[in-house]
Image: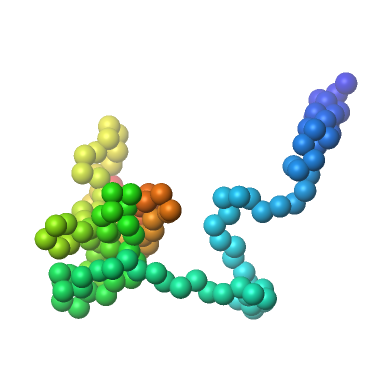
Amino acid sequence: MTTCATSIAVLATWLAISPAAARSETYPQLISTQYDRRAGLPAGATKPILALETVDRSKLPDGAIVSATAKSASGRIWLLTNHGPFRATADGYEPLVVGPRVLEPGQPELRGSARMTALVADHLGHCQATLILTPFDLY
């Protein structure tokens, strides 16, 4: 039997054993779907609503606009503002240092600044952030 014929036989056997694998279904971990702007949203679809955790804005810098919040598993609130990222403390909010505090062996030093553009927490309280680095930040 050739390699191609063997591969086809293995695939056919696997599909026969697992009929669910042959069906086209969405993945259980699917979080979002992207649609073409020209086509519009399907019937019944709605745009998501930005849900922000409760934030005491009086403890933020003047003029701070909160664009995202996340609540960690420990209950601590993390925020993203136009003045940068912050995290809640007992006395208010402290700015976050973006970038590594301790470099790993072989890791290049971050020069310049990284910018956090998104912040989110899942249902378990795992916070994740998106950082943008310009090509000139790494040397």
Q: Residue placed farthest to the left in the image? A: 91
Q: Is residue 46 visible?
A: yes
Task: Tell me where residue 117 appears, x and y as whole percent.
Answer: 35, 63
Please provide percent x and percent y for residue 129.
36, 55
Residue 134 visible in the current orientation: no
Apparent side of residue 51 relative to residue 35 in the rendered image (left or right): left
Relative height, residue 9 to residue 96 (above, below): above
Residue appearing at x 29%, y 71% in the figure: 66
Coloring basis for residues: rainbow
Vertical order, 89 against 67 (above or below): above
Whether 95 is drawn above or below 21: the answer is: below
Q: Residue furthest top?
A: 1
Q: Residue at x 80, y 37 (%)?
A: 15
What residue do we see at 27% from left, 35% from top?
A: 104
Name the one closer to the observer, 135 or 133: 133
Residue 26 % position (x, y): 67, 54
Residue 98 found in image quarter: bottom left
Q: The N terminus appears in which quarter of the rendering?
A: top right
Question: Quadrant of residue 137 in the image?
Answer: bottom left
Residue 13 in the figure: left or right of residue 90: right
Q: Locate residue 60: give its quadrant.
A: bottom left
Name the residue: 28% across, 54% down. 75
Query: How many numbered circles does the render carry?
Result: 0
88 vs 11: above or below: below
On the image, the x and y values in percent for residue 39 come to 67, 76
